[in-house]
Image (tube, rainbow, N blue to C red):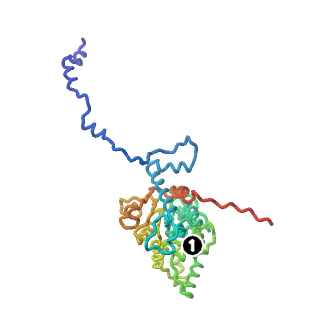
Amino acid sequence: MSSAEETTTMPAAVAATVAAAKPTQPPAAAQDAVLVVSEELPKDAIKIKGYDFNKGLDYSALLASYLTTGFQASAFGRAVLEVNRMRAWRLSDEPVKEDEDEDLVSLEARKAVKCKIFLGYTSNMVSSGIRETIRFLAQHKMVDVIVTTTGGIEEDFIKCMADTYLGDFARDGAALRKRGINRTGNLLVPNKNYCLFEEWLTPILDEMLEEQTTKGTIWTPSSMIRLMGKAINNPDSIYYWCYKNDIPVFCPAITDGSIGDIIYFHSYRNPGLIMDIAGDIRNINSESVFAKKTGMIILGGGLVKHHICNANLMRNGADFAVYVNTGQEFDGSDSGARPDEAKSWGKIRIDAEPVKVYADASLVFPILVAETFAKDFVPEEPQAPKEE
């Protein structure tokens, strides 16, 4: 036997002793930690399964599969269900109360009462192509109340006069400033667009001041927006259709943007115009207080989110709610707050099932509308030209 073998070979008696000392089972504590016994999940628990492209490309089925995909795809699927619930609700779903209004007792009258849907969005939604999705909803009176920022108002009218272009998030701001081009994210807006807007809006402000002086008209932001929607007379405009369909549009920060700049310049050229924001807080709160059921669809955060939620506080909370934004709650902002926080304030009913989708609304909102409002929409057949 070589010297190497002598140093590595264990006597048989010693080897048997060592083998007997080795445990034949893993430690019980480790097994208990890893092999925890599961409780059975409810029979109606949703099973995770994605879309099978072997079945061919069916966009409706693909979007329907989001509910069972997990993560934010499932949040989107739940948002579809929530929006469809608010769209489907009728007063006839509820029992008749003892103190019900006489004109709301009959079944037919109750079937005619729908959930009042509040739509809110930040200005960047109108700067982007989401404007056309919002216009579709207003055009066909699919929402009842709109709340947005000043940019969400003026960008719609400006697009009736001039175009916005695709740029890049990395475009140099100083270089763009020298060229008179404004950047909104990866969108480019020539400054001449705002000059055109000033030329259009200034005579409207003159008209408002004249009516205030001669007739005693008290203008609110919503009545100003309605007048602008009438004046633009362009079916591409969101607010043209809000005017046509009598959809109130609230903008509590009406001076925070180009409209405010023009009102500032106008106050020197033709001073005296007064804007009544107190009138609009009563108007929007009344939209909520006297509604039988309310739903909120809010894209983004900030002022529009809080303004809609606070109006719904006046009725002890909205019955349905969908948020779409990228805000996080760790900084305590209302923009990032989850729907559950709104429940604590009485802005969403405690028995509601609200949904927040953590996503860029420019990705999510068109497909949310596709799976809800537009799902059963039937476009009008184009009319044949009349013969001469």
Extreme right residue here? 388
> Which image quarter is the C terminus in?
bottom right
Tag 1 secondary structure: loop
Picture coordinates of residue 72, whole percent (x, y): 45, 52
Q: Quadrant of residue 229?
A: bottom right
Q: Nearer the viewer, residue 307 or 344?
A: 344
Picture coordinates of residue 79 (x, y %)? Answer: 47, 57
The local crowd at label 1, few if under 14, some if 14 to 19, many if 20 or more residues have their Cα within 10 Å, is some
Q: Residue at x 41, y 72 (%)?
A: 314
The residue that label 1 is drawn on is 246
Amino acid at the residue labelled 1:
Asp
Decide if residue 117 is in sight here: no
- Residue plotted at (49% across, 74% down): 254
Q: Is residue 119 above or below residue 264?
A: above
Counting from the top left corner in percent of width and height, residue 368 is at 52, 57
Q: Is residue 360 above or below residue 203?
A: above
Quarter of the N terminus within the rendering: top left
